[in-house]
Image (spheres, grey):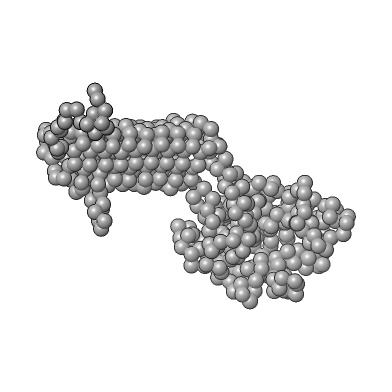
Amino acid sequence: MSLSIVILAAGKGSRMKSDTAKVLHSISGRPMLHHITQSALALSDDVIIVIAHQKERVRAAMAEFTGVRFVEQDTDNFPGTGGAMMGIQPKYERVLVLNGDMPLITPQALEGFLNTQTPIVMSIFKLDNPDGYGRVIIGAEGVERIVEQKDATSEELHVNAVNAGVYSFSREVLKRYIPMLSNANAQKEYYLTDVIALARRDGVHVEPLLVDEEHFKGVNSKFDLSRAETIHQERLKRSWMEAGVIMQLPQSIYIESDVVFEGECVVENGVRITGKSRIVRSAIKAHSVVEESVMIDSDCGPMAHLRPKSHLERTHVGNFVETKNARLTGVKAGHLSYLGDATIDEGSNIGAGTITCNYDGKKKYETRIGKNVFIGSDTQIVAPCVIADDVIVAAGTTVTRDVEQGALAISRTKMSTVSGFFYKFFGTKA
């Protein structure tokens, strides 16, 4: 499509009250700017991101998008949305201007800006309570002017059409009017909205395009961020449920953008799934956390924790079991265990209270457990350690060296009893 898209991502976002640039705050595990860039690339092969504040961090966060162009602007001398557009060289005749703090925009929501020959198309939405917004005055010939609330007459204050902040310009309009912008205003900023005023003065037609507030919602505060993420989460979960995933009380579930489900899966209430997790024909029970992990024909929880690089296949991981960088194939680990930096093979059973002691304070070490191994409860396996196939490890054992195939590993002090000690200790009689 012959369309250039400019994404304004240069601002600090002071109302976020954060040391992080506004566009880098996350929605469903990805920066806001990532979501809007993804939508832009679905429509154009000429996407320009305007950067200034924390520009290197923004570049790094968007590194996967190799097809975008970055333009660094001098926002100290040319602040504002108009300043951000100065010197931009779009490839195509049609230029769509988006904001990096609008993570809910989809390619479908932008269809009204496409395939138009109108010099300027300006997005508006209507609010029941437009208080605080500039009003868009629309006449028979389109947009007449934009009036800031403080400058509006009593009649204009009743107008509920407000500027949604997205524009489609002809390249010629931008070339003509951007150099004419002035910062002679209270904020000493260059405003893109002044292009509308300059164009209307010259009789240029400005077409209003009514859009829905949900898709064009801007994020200016941590509260806005939370509301946008709620909407984004609803979209994600709905799409996966329509694809066949069962979700119980979906409003209590959190799923990040890069999570992938395959086949019929079950996700119970209170579950959190993050990173590039892949869930295949598996069940995640209530209040479990899955981070950057793979589950294939497996189940975990309730209240299990799969930390990054866990890979479960045909495996049951029960309540209060934590795995990390662990590959479990055909394993049962029912409850109360920590399995870190471990590989465990077919038919092995991990008893309650088992832990792999993988860290000596300086380095991490691996534990390897073979096939058909029975690990008794309250076992500590001090890595590095290899437990061969067909081994029994007795309950309460601390394994400190490799165990050969078919062996019993046991380390206990001999149990003894002292008759009548209870009564002697408490000074009572039998």
Q: Residue furthest bottom?
A: 77
> Residue at image x 46%, y 63%?
60
Quarter of the rendering occupied by the C terminus: top left
Quarter of the rendering occupied by the N terminus: bottom right
Camera-nearest residue between 310 and 116: 310
Side (left or right) of 302 relative to 222: left
Side (left or right) of 144 relative to 6: right
Side (left or right) of 204 relative to 288: right
Q: Is residue 299 visible?
A: yes
> Residue at image x 87%, y 59%?
153
Camera-nearest residue between 77 and 2: 77
Which quadrant of the view contains residue 423? top left
Side (left or right) of 116 relative to 14: right
Which quadrant of the view contains residue 282? top left
Q: Position of residue 217 (x, y in %)?
A: 65, 51
Q: Position of residue 407 (x, y in %)?
A: 11, 34
For residue 403, above or below residue 246: below
Q: Is residue 110 visible?
A: no
> Residue at image x 75%, y 75%?
184
